[in-house]
Amino acid sequence: RSHFGSSSKAILYNPSSFEGAMSDDEMPDQAATGFEDDMDMSDDMGDGPIDELPEGVEKEILTEAIGSSWKTPKPGDEVTVHYVGTLLSDGSEFDSSRGRNQPFVFTLGRGQVIKGWDVGVATMKKGEIAKFTLAPQFAYGAVGSPPKIPENATLVFEIELLSWMSKDDLFGDEGVIKTQVVEGSGYKSPKMGDEVLLSMKATGPDGNVVEEVKELEYILGSVALGAVGKACDRALTDMKKGEEAELKCSKDYAYGDRTPEGAVLTLNLLQIYETKDVSLNSDKSVMKKMIKEGENYDLPKEGQKVKMTVESATDGSKSSLPGFTAMDIEFAALNGEVCDALECAAASMKQGERAVLSTIPALLVDGVLGLSGVTEEKVLLTVKMNEFEKGKDTWSLSEDEKVEFGTARKEVGSNLFKAGRVLLALENYKKVAQLLNYIDNFQEDNKQKAKELKKVCSLNKAACYLKLKIYYDAKVACDAVLKEESQNVKALYRLAQAQFGMKNFADCMKDCKKILEVDPQSKDARVLYKQAVAGQKEEDKKSKGLFANMCKALGKGPIPEPEKQKMDIDDEDEERPNLEEAATTSEETHAPEGGA
């Protein structure tokens, strides 16, 4: 019989507590134990310094933890240990779980054991054996625990941490107690609104199955799990892929009066579907749901060969689209050899990754998939990244290679622009800008080539933005050119177009005047100027009407005429310019000498 059966505050030994205890052979392996990564980890990051223990508790590690074990239990976890307790004064043994050949199980941090145990075991890792020397205030204090433990006794415990079960009170009211059965992998946990693949089984106190779902695609926060949704949602937000947990729920978190004594839910998180917007314009026109993680961290780079499989093509109801057959495709990334939807997917996928793309028919036109005539509002493609060419990283390229590569990407962008694939062209121009972001240390010849290439790509970016009616970004691209060449006519004209698009008519007129100072024969600038004047007059008219109504309400007099714009340009070419057509003319400057 254990000495810890005494009524004083001591290590509690209750024979019934061992009925569910596991033998050494039944102990779960490391993957089946542990605790949640997002808890208080003040003591669980590796081998924390022992001097963090309070004075009166000394620790000596006798056997290091198993392998790469680094986690430690937290308060509320159910720990399983072996121990031998002796008196420091004479070394006599007063209790031993090993002598009974029966591990001891208790809940950490709940006062079920002496204070020194709650403090000391919290610093241990699975498989670790440690010797703790506990001063009386961390053991049995001044009274001791007769007859084996005298007054003011200092005790020595050799403790082996066999395993623990992570337990959490999810809502702080003991309505849902979560026990981790199998530890998950990775570092990601789903959040509300994320989609996951899970299995759930609910049983009543009698063991009968109340409800069971297998491999359910579930969105956290939805109503798909009904009455147990709240408990499952809260548990899932702390779980990792592959984790299994047991939730002991009161009736309020389970099925109400249907299970008045509550229910036990076994929850398996099979997969976390990472869904993100991979569209070129960040407008959610291509959404990628990852259904199988890829390898490593590498992604395909522009111009590199990609091999993918398009496994299926369905409509929003998952009905197969007529005429489609699964196919393997090979193409160079960002070269426009496949539709925009596949280009977007490829740029964001790792090798071995599988994903479902949700896109629109307009982004599937390429003559490869055979989906040009699709009329469905939404199309789902299941794709797999088989492999891709792993070329040099751009940061590792030499000066000559950067200039050559940038020139090639600019040419690809120009061809795409002419073909009407403006977003893909813009992406290539952006890549060139990133490649040549820092050129101060280039040799003079390469520096000049790089500057010219950056200028051309900035002008072409502005043309793309104008075509897409993203006027502010067009202005930024023009400003970058004008910072270096204040009289660049194309930059000034595209800037004026951007100002007109933003209804900054006064600034548009100012920019048109700058163009005419450099090129007095510019017909486009004259026409745009007149349209800006007309636009400003219309704005003034609206302002006059607004203020007139305000003053009328206030009982005030007439509003003076807005100041008229002075115009020093002949009243010719009254026809409104087609700004969109003007924006489609991409900068056709040839590649710098030696650049291609």
Image (tube, rainbow, N blue to C red):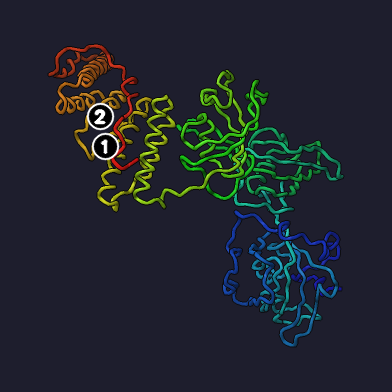
Residue 159 in picture, x, y percent from top left: 73, 73
Query: For the residue labelled by badge 1, is the local secondary structure a helix, a strand or a loop?
Result: helix
Residue 79 in picture, x, y percent from top left: 73, 63
In the depicted structure, whether residue 575 falls above or below residue 121: above
Residue 382 shows in this picture: yes
Residue 209 in picture, x, y percent from top left: 84, 40
CA neighbours of label 1 inside 10 A, class few (<14), some (14 to 19), many (20+): many
Foreground: 516 or 510?
516
In the rendered structure, are the residues bearing label 1 and label 2 in contact, judged by CB atoms less than 8 Å apart?
A: yes
Residue 521 in picture, x, y percent from top left: 16, 21
* Amino acid of disc 1: Val
Write the residue at 35% across / 24% down. Answer: 584
Foreground: 300 or 6?
300
* Left/right of residue 505 with respect to residue 367 in the rendered view: left
In the depicted structure, whether residue 157 falls above or below residue 443: below
* Amino acid of disc 2: Lys
Residue lying at the far bottom in this picture: please name it: 90
Foreground: 255 or 281?
281
Write the residue at 80% across / 75% down. Answer: 96
Q: CA distance from mark 1 to mark 2?
A: 10 Å
Query: For the residue labelled by badge 2, is the local secondary structure a helix, a strand or a loop?
Result: helix
**Quick one: quadrant of the N terminus?**
bottom right
Write the residue at 51% across / 35% down. Answer: 344
Looking at the image, tell me whether mark 1 or mark 2 is earlier in sequence order.
1
Residue 476 shows in this picture: no
Image disc number at residue 469: none
**Quick one: quadrant of the C terminus?**
top left
In the depicted structure, whether residue 112 falls above or below residue 222: below
Q: Which residue is mark 2?
A: 490
Q: Which residue is mark 1?
A: 481
